[in-house]
Image: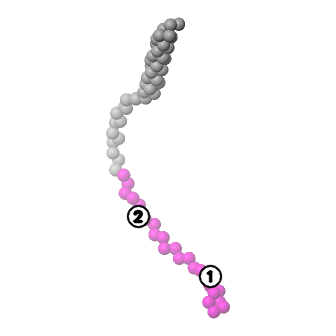
Amino acid sequence: MKRNGEATLPVFTNTYTEPAEPPAPKPEEPKPEEPKQEVIPATGDAAMLAVGATAALGAALAGAGYLARKKRGE
């Protein structure tokens, strides 16, 4: 900063105070962990439904085609 032609350097004053140490944790006996049951995700359930629906639709279309052909006399 310049004041009246004189330059002065900025001065840094450290005002940091170190915080007090946190209290030491009390030693406790660890709780025994119960083993978790493994869960197997069911990822193929919807796939089997799609296969069944496709097979049923194919059978219905084949039956309808057979009846239409029979009705025409072929």
Which residue, given by chain and number where applicable, does mark 1 sit on?
Answer: 9
Magenta segment, prevailing SS (helix, strand or loop)? loop
Q: Which mark is residue 62?
A: none
7 relative position to 19: left or right: right
Q: Residue at x 53, y 7 (%)?
A: 74
Mark 1: secondary structure? loop
In which image quadrant can residue 43 be found?
A: top left
Mark 2: secondary structure? loop
Q: What residue range appears in magenta?
A: 1-25
**Amino acid identity at mark 1:** Leu
The foreground one among 28 and 51 is: 51
The foreground one among 34 and 32 is: 34
Q: Residue at x 52, y 73 (%)?
A: 14
Depicted 17 relative to depicted 50: above or below: below
Q: Please tell me which of labels 2 and 1 falls first in the chain.
A: 1
The percent position of residue 13, horizontal first and vertical second, equals 53, 76
